[in-house]
Every structure is written in structure tokens, then in C-alpha cells.
Image (cartoon, helix red, strand yellow):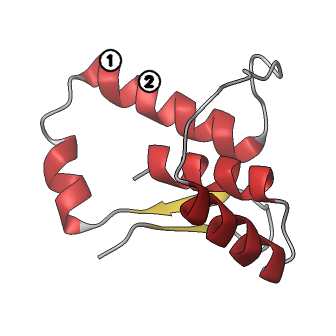
Amino acid sequence: MKKQIKYHKKIKRPIHYFSEESLKNGQKLTPMEIIRYLEDFKTLHLGKEVSKKSESISIKIPELLFTVFKRKAELEGIPYQTKIKKLMKEWTLH
């Protein structure tokens, strides 16, 4: 079961739903790790990033995979780099 993130209609704040697996894994965290996770979640979803600086990266991806990824992003109407960032953001919250 995948974790869902929805936004409260009136106050536009994220509501975080956890899967059973996520809750089980969360029980292994220390209180400080839980606080850090919640702070990171708030930062990512409320746009209050401490640093708006971006990191440039270089990555080797098989040509066909990259071509298909770019085409799929284009079909969704989203630039492929934006799609990569969105996937990274979703993955870090999983």
C-alpha cells in the first residue's frame, strides 16, 4: 500500500497517511529521528525550504530509458527535469 499525501481543503496543509509498513518502520526510530522526519516533511510540503539553492548533478542513464522517460514526461505536460524532482520528492517521503 502506497502512502498518500493529501491537502486539507480549508487550510491547505498536507495530511500524511501512513501505510502499515511505514508505521511499523517508524516504531524503530528514535525521538530525534522522528522530529527530523517531521521537520523535513514540513519543509518539503510547505515550501519553507531553508536553502533554495539547487545542486547540479551528472548522471549516466541508458539512452533508450532517458528517451522514453522524456517522452512520457512530455505526454504528461511536464518538463522531464521537473518530473525527476517530483519523483525524488515523493521517494524521499516513502
> What kind of residue is marked 1?
Met
Q: Judge whether residue 41 can be spotted in this image.
A: yes
In the rendered image, residue 16, in percent from the top left (x then y), is placed at: 49, 59
**Any mark on residue 36, and which?**
2
Q: Quadrant of residue 39?
A: top right
Q: Residue type at mark 2: give it.
A: Arg
Q: Do tag 1 and tag 2 residues touch (Cβ < 8 Å)?
A: yes
Mark 2 closeness class: few <14, some 14–19, many ≥20 residues within 10 Å = few
Quarter of the image for residue 31 reads: top left
* Residue picked out by circle 1: 32
Q: Residue at x 73, y 65 (%)?
A: 70
Left or right placement of residue 86 versus residue 30 in this view: right
Q: Residue at x 75, y 27 (%)?
A: 49
- Mark 1: give few (<14), some (14-19) or many (20+) Cα within 10 Å: few
Q: CA distance from mark 1 to mark 2?
A: 6 Å
Tell me: residue 17, above or below residue 46: below
Closer to us: 48 or 53: 53
Residue pictured at 71% horizontal, 56% vertical: 13
Q: Residue farthest to the front?
A: 63
Provide the secondary structure element on which disc 2 rests.
Answer: helix
Tell me where residue 7 appears, x and y as whole percent: 68, 67
Q: In the rendered view, does 65 fall on the left or right side of 29?
A: right
Measured along the vertical axis of the image, is residue 3 above or below residue 56? below
Q: Nearer the viewer, residue 73 or 60?
A: 60
